[in-house]
Amino acid sequence: MLKEKRIGMIGGGKMGGALMGGMISGGLVKAEALTVADKDEDRLGELVKAYGVTVTVDNRKAVRHADVVILAVKPQNMADVLDELADAVMPSALVISIAAGIATAFIEERLGKGVRVVRVMPNMPALIGEGAAALCCGVSAAEADLELARHIFGAVGITMEVKETLMDAVTGLGGSGPGYAFLIIEALTDAGIRMGLGREVALKLSAQSLFGAAKLCLLGKTPPAELRAMVTSPGGTTLAGLKVLEEGRLRETLISAVEAATRRSAELGGRK
Ligand SMILES: NC(=O)c1ccc[n+]([C@@H]2O[C@H](COP(=O)([O-])OP(=O)(O)OC[C@H]3O[C@@H](n4cnc5c(N)ncnc54)[C@H](OP(=O)(O)O)[C@@H]3O)[C@@H](O)[C@H]2O)c1
């Protein structure tokens, strides 16, 4: 799908790096087909060493011949980068943006009418190929463009299509989700230590319990509530623990956290 295409990436930081690693190791593209532009020359040196990609500090050079342009700079740098790229991007190019909160209309307006844009919200576990990314299309992007973007992000995790109006919710749940999980793992580890376990054992038990439970949920065969019922015997240990979590309003607290993060995403994008 991507084999004959040239890719230009602007921003080779954490997420850009994860993406190029996934695409190359997954055999989606050859390193020679990828040109990465970044203003950090040390970082560019690291990318050459790690992946053998072509690098440049000239953003326009990276996109001039690119069939697919991936924008992976911070949201606050997007306006400047788009203005710089406006007359360098090929009219036939597909533009994929991963910048949190930046609407497809904003990119279309700056790059010119008719540009095909797919917006993606990935999350941090993409770094190890276990990301979750939601995608939506701009006005001119076609089904084939969405498929191509799903193919790219499929190299670093799972993908799903959503309406653009739901991107703040995606950010509040999937974008921030790893942060919530880290807090839970941290707290469970501390609890294990308090109960007498060593730190390493407590951390492994906490993280693997969440990982295993998450994998069972992702199989999609049994809803989480049913899985929970399966591990909760009357008068047993899990019931005793769950009772405390319900009394502590964990469920409501998590819902409020996702609401707050969704609101914040809208605020940062100037939508509220
Ligand atoms: N990391 C995540 O978990 C995550 C999750 C979802 C979405 N995203 C999105 O992914 C994008 C990148 O995030 P990141 O975490 O990968 O950021 P990052 O590590 O800071 O990478 C961005 C890179 O772009 C470079 N850069 C800045 N301005 C530039 C310019 N004008 N031209 C060329 N390169 C420029 C930066 O260089 P300097 O460091 O020298 O400024 C940096 O190397 C963001 O828009 C973010 O919203 C990230």
Image (tube, rainbow, N blue to C red):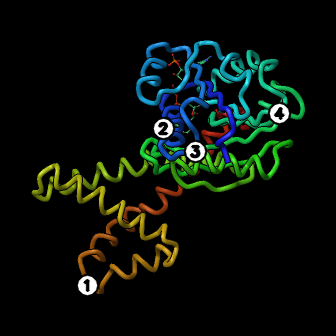
Q: Amino acid at mark 3?
A: Leu
Horizontal side of 8 relative to 176 (left or right) equals right
Mark 4 within 8 Å of ligand 1, using the beta carbon: no
Q: CA distance from mark 2 to mark 4?
A: 25 Å
Point out residue 28 in the picture as x, y percentages from the top left corner: 57, 44
Mark 3 within 8 Å of ligand 1, using the beta carbon: no
Point out residue 158 in the picture as x, y percentages from the top left corner: 55, 55
Q: Amino acid at mark 2?
A: Gly
> What kind of element bears circle 3?
loop
Q: Is residue 261 visible?
A: no
Instruction: Choose top left, top right, bottom left or bottom right for residue 207.
Output: bottom left
Q: Is residue 176 visible?
A: yes
Q: Which residue is mark 4?
A: 92
Horizontal side of 52 relative to 248 (left or right) equals right
Instruction: Give the mark, 4 or 3, whose residue is nearer the N terminus.
Output: 3
Label 1: few (<14), some (14–19) or many (≥20) C-alpha neighbours in 10 Å:
few
Q: Which residue is mark 3?
A: 28
> What kind of element bears circle 1?
loop
Horizontal side of 261 relative to 163 (left or right) equals left
Label disc, if present, on residue 21 of the rendered structure: 2
Instruction: Choose top left, top right, bottom left or bottom right for residue 86.
Output: top right
Could you tell me if the residues under marks 1 and 3 are in contact, i.e. CB atoms within 8 Å?
no
Q: Which residue is mark 1?
A: 235
In the image shown, does 116 or 105 lie closer to the viewer?
116
